[in-house]
Image (cartoon, rainbow, N blue to C red):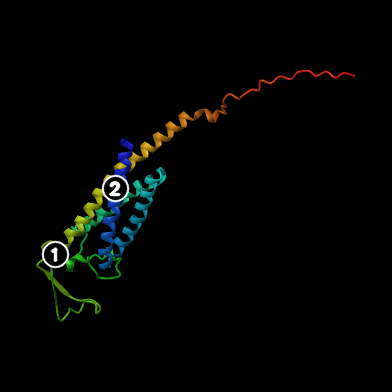
Amino acid sequence: MGYCNGRCTLIFICGMQLVCVLERQIFDFLGYQWAPILANFVHIIIVILGLFGTIQYRPRYIKGYAVWLVLWVTWNVFVICFYLEAGDLSKETDLILTFNISMHRSWWMENGPGCTVTSVTPAPDWAPEDHRYITVSGCFLEYQYIEVAHSSLQIVLALAGFIYACYVVKCITEEEDSFDFIGGFDSYGYQGPQKTSHLQLQPMYMSK
């Protein structure tokens, strides 16, 4: 019963991860955040493989999923540090999340709850021609905290997924070992008793 509950819980966690990361992927696309888009895509693929492994009793897939979750937690910790400007990171000047190919910021910067966007004219000389120069005010929640909340949710789901993935792999391995022990006689060429014929050959005499 515990194994079934653990497996069902892992399936539920994988489903939640897919829903949350797809929602995040949409807003990263809208904000042209290429590094998160790539990371989200890899995460989606591996969560699907982990879900497949859980349903089909494939511990190798579940182990790969668990290893990826460690990297996924590391990535989300970095994103949190980036938006909170830990150390030398700066969300205003660093363009790490766009691979330095554009000056786009998080979609939530202009579209957060209560945000009012005002275009500034004329734009400064350093501003690219294909970009608007704007000011954002009145936000109920700053965009960096929304991004931090997204990453924090991913970390919580990843930690839960890692714990249950390890538990399910342990249960599958123990079940396979138990099965091998029960059927161990087959490996020694054990054969059951065979039916023997009760017919006896009688000598036959032929008259000349």
Q: Which quadrant of the view contains residue 40?
A: bottom left
Gap between marks 1 and 2 measured at Cα: 30 Å
Residue wearing tag 2 = 12
In the displayed structure, would residue 142 be above or below residue 203?
Answer: below
Instruction: Residue at the far bottom: name it.
Output: 122
- Relative image position of residue 32 (x, y in whole percent): 28, 68
The x and y percentages for residue 142 are 14, 62
* Quadrant of the drawing holding the C terminus: top right
Q: Is residue 124 placed above or below 149 in the rendered structure? A: below
Provide the residue designation for mark 1: 113
Most foreground residue, 182 or 206: 206
Q: Residue at x 36, y 53 (%)?
A: 48
x 33%, y 37%: residue = 3
Label 1 secondary element? loop
The N terminus sits in image quarter: top left
- Looking at the rendered image, the disc whose residue lies closer to the viewer, 1 or 2, is 2
| Position in image of residue 83 (x %, y %) | 20, 59
Relative to 95, 48 lies left or right: right
Which residue lies most toward the left here? 138
Earlier-in-chain disc, 1 versus 2 = 2
At mark 2, the secondary structure is helix
Residue kind at label 2, given as amino acid type:
Phe
Decide which of 148, 191 is in the foreground and name it.
191
